[in-house]
Image (cartoon, grey):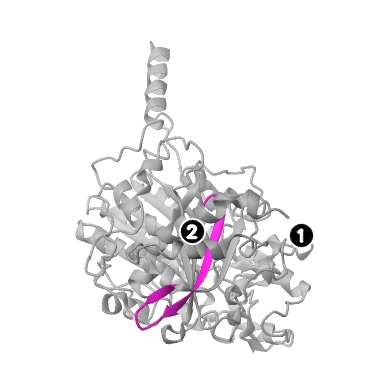
Amino acid sequence: MFESLQRCCVCVLIIYTLTPAVVETKAKNVLFIMADDLRTTLGCYGDPLVKTPNIDQLASKSQVFLNAFAQQAVCGPSRTSMLTSRRPDTTRLYDFYSYWRVAAGNYTTLPQYFKSQGYTTMSVGKVFHPGIASNYTDDYPYSWSVPPYHPPSFRYEKEKMCKGAGGGLHANLLCAVDVAEQPGGTLPDLESAAEAVRLLRGLGDDGDDGPFFLAVGFHKPHIPFRIPQEYLSLYPLDQMSLAPDPEVPEGLPSVAYNPWMDLRLREDVMALNTSFPYGPIPKDFQLRIRQHYYAAVSYLDAQVGRLLTALDDSRLADDTMVVFSSDHGWSLGEHGEWAKYSNFDVATQVPLMFYVPGVTFFPDWLQPGTIFPFVDVFGRSEHRFKAGHVVRNVVELVDVFPTVSYMAGLDAPEPCPLVSFKEELCTEGDNLAYTFGRLERGKDDEDIAFSQYPRPADVPQVNSDLPLLANIKVMGYSLRSWDYRYTLWLGFDPNTFKANVTDVHAGELYMLADDPLQDHNLYRRSDHRHMLRRTSGLRQSLSLQKRMRLQLLYLTAGMKSHLKP
């Protein structure tokens, strides 16, 4: 009798997992975790060196999107885009110096939408970009039920806190520290994790006070690498390697190059006296940068582990969705570049995973136990966590808002019209709920990600990484599909916020099957002049995304004939 019941339960479970995701009517809590400058340097994304056991454990119980991309590879524009589900051309934020509600439209944000649906919304750490970009309030009180928390020790992040060889303090890039010697004996992400743990414990004790949306933004692995020094021991220098493609690609247009000025302004990098803009960083220092970045990622992992364990201890893991992502990636020497500020995968690709209890993970009701036990990265763990259900097709950060809403049990915002400045609530992304609980059938050529990056000129300048709006002269629009990355650098008018589709400054085309690192630009070898002539007659009202889709189809239709050596 018991064996028959077991077989019946297994059959029901199999049928359930092979059908589209079914969301319970009861609203789910949301724990929304954001990293800063985190590329897909995680064990669950296949990195063989990095040690990220807690994030990997989360991934093993989540749906993981392997090809998720930001809309602009810099903090303020990316975060505003993701949290409003509008692209930078709609938020009109390309730098840090405007507030979308004033400069573009009164767009509803993700936490604001949850707040309007009866959720208590809370922010800890860096969620919105601070300053003008979020009205100096992190968009409070629109988005948050209570004033956001910022770690007090962050005020020291840009000061001279890094001990040099002679004992003096410097504003360095590489800044592993003894935490006990830091002001207050702490660091920003340690404080943010402690505050988030405190809130989770209180929410667990409160019981039936209604659903919550808790966003926790960690500052690392953003530079400077001011991290606990013990994490460097996880990555001995003799085990580190250079980027597989550390040279500036021969066919890279000068407008596409990112001269990594934020690194050049650090004292230890200044001392290297590298020539601007293409002079390489010495190889021994490159290895140290990569070592510190990996150590910062493991430090971040430990803080994520503290949150997940607190979620468990507070008995909230069974009815709380956990979302983990980053605002954009970070170049570690690929293409001779460092930091973000480009359209390459290493700068735009981000981790993205959703833990949805009852959809991506089914607790064992016969043998209940801890879902997220803390894993000490310094301990000897026999576990090698892998991603749970994975989606390989391309998705975007503008997809997060509608997906989180739907998977939490709310209505997803409707798609935006072509011009949506007067629409307060809509999405320029896709609701990815259809991908949950079903097997991916292979590549979908219709799935693309669309990113962009501004430049002040066709050649690298000291403000190429972060041009002010008034100085933007060129906008690089980049389309990423399963097979290709296609980028057009177009003349841009900062007064009208519009690109001139007939003013093409440069182009890039990478065939990812043969060139996954995007080192061999095929644009000049393609029939791009004929393509531009053929597509110049397209109606002006056609969106740039659709125009570039058609251009890519034209370029790649004859790849075999046009790209013969």
Q: Is residue 492 magenta?
A: yes
Q: Write the start and end of the magenta stretch as one range.
A: 480-501
Q: Nearer the viewer, residue 510 or 120?
A: 510
* Residue drawn at x 57%, y 80% as measured from the top left: 458
* Residue drawn at x 30%, y 53% as measured from the top left: 205
* Residue drawn at x 41%, y 18% as measured from the top left: 6
Q: Earlier in the sequence, mark 2 or mark 1?
A: 1
Note whether 450 is above or below 4 in the view shown.
below
Spot occupied by residue 254 in the image (x, y as percentages of width and height): 62, 76
Q: Amino acid at mark 1?
A: Gln
The residue pinned by badge 1 equals 239
Q: CA distance from mark 2 to mark 1?
A: 44 Å
Task: Please give the label number shown on residue 551.
Answer: 2
Residue 418: quadrant of the picture: bottom left
Residue 10: quadrant of the picture: top left
Q: Nearer the viewer, residue 179 or 48?
A: 48
